[in-house]
Image (cartoon, rainbow, N blue to C red):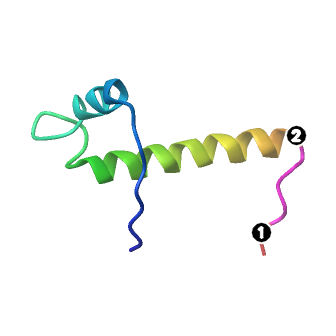
Amino acid sequence: MAKISVEIPDELLADLDEHVGDDGKFVNRSDAVRASIRKTLDVLDEIDSRHGRLEAEE
């Protein structure tokens, strides 16, 4: 699995951390970021599909 580095504003990171840990939805920050990326890509694919911009999968 590749590692990347991103800069995140402190306020956004604090919001993310509220959802991470024993009482949160995610085990760690990486899981939260991966889930967010997947969700964003799904939304973008849906928008592209509605506008006829998606190529057919082979």
Q: What secondary structure is the stretch in magenta mostly built from? A: loop
Is 28 left or right of 37, judged from the image as shown?
left
Quadrant location of the C terminus in the rendered image: bottom right
SS under mark 1: loop
Answer above or below: position of 4 versus 25: below
Is 45 left or right of 56, judged from the image as shown?
left
Residue located at (30% from left, 26% from top) = 15
Q: Earlier in the sequence, mark 1 or mark 2?
A: 2
Magenta stretch? 52-56
Label 2 Cα crowd, 10 Å radius (few <14 / some 14-19 / many 20+): few
Q: Which mark is residue 51?
A: 2
Q: Give the labeled residue for mark 1.
A: 57
Residue at the far left: name it.
Answer: 22
Residue located at (9% from left, 40% from top) = 22
In percent of width and height, residue 43 lies at: 63, 40
Is 20 left or right of 30, judged from the image as shown?
left
Amino acid type, residue under disc 1 in the picture = Glu
Residue located at (38% from left, 67% from top) = 3
Return the residue nearer the eye: 35 or 58: 35
Residue located at (52% from left, 43% from top) = 39
Quadrant location of the N terminus in the rendered image: bottom left
Residue at the far right: name it.
Answer: 52
Q: For the image shown, how many numbered marks are present on the structure?
A: 2
Amino acid type, residue under disc 2 in the picture = His
Asked if the magenta segment contains residue 54, the reply would be: yes
Label 1 Cα crowd, 10 Å radius (few <14 / some 14-19 / many 20+): few
Quadrant in the rendering for residue 25: top left
In percent of width and height, residue 24 lies at: 19, 35
Asked if the magenta segment contains residue 48, the reply would be: no
